[in-house]
Image: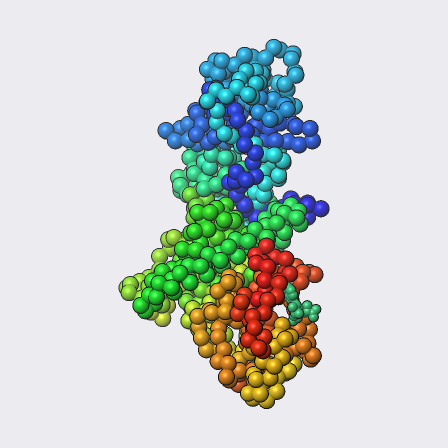
Amino acid sequence: MSPSEMLGKKKLHQMVDTKSPSTFKRVKVDATRNFPENCGSFVCQNNGSKETYLEFPSNTKSVKVDSTRSFPENCGPCVPEKKNGSDTLCSVDSEIKSCSEVDMNVVGSAEPLTVFVPEDDLAATGARPKEAGDSSHQDTSCQPTNGNQQHEVLVNRVLQNPSIDTGNTRDWFIKDELIEPELPAIVSQENLIEARNEPSKETSKRVHYEEVPDDESRSRVDNDEICILSCSESNSLKSGLKTPSAGKKGGKDEIVQEEAVRCPEPLHKCKVIFEDASVVKKKQIDLGVSQEDLRNSAVMCGVSRNGLSTQHEHIQKVKEVRETLKLFDDEYTKLLLEDRAEKHEGRSKRRIHIEAAMALKKQKKWVNCEWTFGDVPGVQIGDQFRFRAELVMIGLHHQFIKGINYVTLGRKDVASSIVDSGRYDNEAISSETFIYVGQGGNPKVSVNERVEDQKLEGGNLALKNSMDLGYPVRVICGRQRVNGEKNDIRYIYDGLYTVTKCWEERAPTGKYSFKFELKRNLGQPKLTRELVSRPAKLQYNKDAGMPSNECFLLLGMERSFNTRGSASIEAENRIDHDEYLFDIGNYDEEIPKRNVAHNNNLKVESNSLMRKDEDGFTLDALIYGNIGRFINHSCSPNLYAENVMYYHGDKRVPHIMFFASESIAPLEELTYHYNYHVDHVSDKNGDMKRKNCRCGSRKCEGRMY
Ligand SMILES: C[S@@+](CC[C@H](N)C(=O)[O-])C[C@H]1O[C@@H](n2cnc3c(N)ncnc32)[C@H](O)[C@@H]1O
């Protein structure tokens, strides 16, 4: 069952299809004729069992088409229109004249495509109308349905012979398969409007308007006028606000207001809220979906991985994300080492993580660049990151610095994600609800700036709009780790939340702050709450002698070392089976020395620290040990080891614990990096030892040491 079937087609998740070239095949069409520019943004074709969509450039010419004909049903919801010098798309409500149909051939396509051309422009195309009765090129899926006269023409002799290159060709895109795009529901706080990208049902699905008494509507929509409109690939729409004629029961709908609205991304249906108080009617569209349903739907969308329709696609996306993060590790480590080699006096001013991310951007290695509401493909709840740059590269949050990430939808800014960095006084209400303090006026953040009242603008306004519209917000928690090192932060993807309340409150500074209540959407995998607990500082449980709110996995490694000092010496004598030896304790150097060839950042920060040999101990798991000793080495490991102290405070004999450095699929082998260094391992006689590595990872250089 496809995710959309699972969801009963109620997709809340909003993923804007930016028509990434990677999902399209390039075709060449003749640009000497302008007719496609004048037509709708989609042309569909029945190509055997598949339907294909031809996408037209958005710099369209002015055109008016006949809304009484239902061609937009089949050929895309909108038809471009030029108004006041700027491109807009008219909705099917708009004043429309007439349109005709032509065929064109696309190189590589067996069938001609049928497109619609305004009659006025037919002459300009030089296209020859097809003989009446000749149905050889008819595409049933694109037929106007009201029997209006069709002008079907063959327009492109050049393209019938693809070998002739006129030098006037343009690249367009054609989808190689029908992917049902995920255009999730657009919701208001109390209402859910299902918006699907199904052009063929566009007209029949148009939302009905329900008249709501003025007093009720005022409390519900506050002088806003709402209507549902179409918008398409040119990222803009012209909305016609349609209301039943005032006072005329059963009267014909009429457009009382028209307004051009720019959409940030193509959407097929938009809810447009007109804030012009002069508009008479107030309406609310009630599809009977509660806020609770909405929150569940949001979660469901998350589960469906943003519409990635198969498990295969999901796994593929996870791999892409991992690959990007690994490449980032490589680049980051490279730049870090370069920076250290430059021997900066004092602290380096370079922001290496951002530099590394930008280098990957240049190489087009970022993933999920399209704007997404809801979960992000390939990213799972609980995933952890070291840098905000990593969040940006994988599309979880699009801001390197700012905590609230938002996009303009219609005329409103709407938040898609927030980073709860722990620098504001956010508080937990329960394990599923917390209060997020708006941005601005925080002396902890803007140290040199005067503390002022927060303003309802930018991110704060976007969060309020998210509340009004009921959009899900991704929450990423930035938390300092247990060792309390200043820069040792982890960003953890906590899941989708809904903003449920917003108010102003006087802060301890005496200035006003905006506060937002966020509730975690239901049905999401539970996180160890402590991992993202608020306030940020991790607590130390004195009785247990261990961190009380850090999640860790204890393998129960038995003590296979003996009393102080003697194991170091003894380990040297066991060097021939050194693969089972694990040095522990007393790490005192910060610069990675043994790890330079290993670019997994998590390793760099853990096992890369150098031990004071004279003081340390070594675990020998050859004869006695627990399951940890069966973990093989890999050059692309999925675990990393940490020293963890509990039961006692002797740093020389910490427990070694393994943590997942990425999501691990069931039955996937657990591996960590042994941190050997090629040509740096010798036997007890001092002779260099070699061991081939058989981890099989793409990054493997063939030798373990
Ligand atoms: C700690 S043990 C790991 C478990 C071991 N494979 C076993 O089955 O008992 C280390 C031993 O596994 C071998 N080993 C682990 N990872 C390896 C790799 N990537 N390539 C070659 N040998 C590996 C080492 O040579 C060593 O003999």
Seen as rendered, the residue at the extreme top is 131
* Lateral position of residue 546 relative to residue 511, left or right: right
Q: Which of 673 and 75 is in front in this view?
A: 673
Q: Position of residue 304 (x, y in %)?
A: 63, 50
Taking the view exactly as shown, the residue that stands out farthest to the bottom is: 563
- Placement of 689 over or under 141, stated as above or below: below
- Quadrant hosting residue 131: top right
Residue 212 visible in the displayed image: no
Point out the image quarter for the C terminus.
bottom right
Query: Where in the figure is residue 379, as x and y percent of width and height?
Result: 56, 55
| Count of numbered labels shown in the rendering | 0
Taking the spot 48% from the left edge, 44% from the top edge, the residue there is 214
The residue that appears at 42% across and 43% down in the rendered structure is 411
Q: Which colour scheme is used?
A: rainbow
Q: Where is residue 563? Give x, y as percent.
A: 59, 89
Q: Is residue 593 left or right of residue 635?
A: left
Residue 62 visible to an observer of this rendering: yes
- Give the residue displayed 59% in from the left and 23% down from the top: 113
Relative image position of residue 654 (x, y in whole percent)? 56, 80
Q: Between 50 and 206, which is closer to the camera in this rendering? A: 50
Decide: is 575 above or below 293.
below
Q: Quadrant of ligand 1?
A: bottom right
- Depth check: 609 or 326 in front? 609
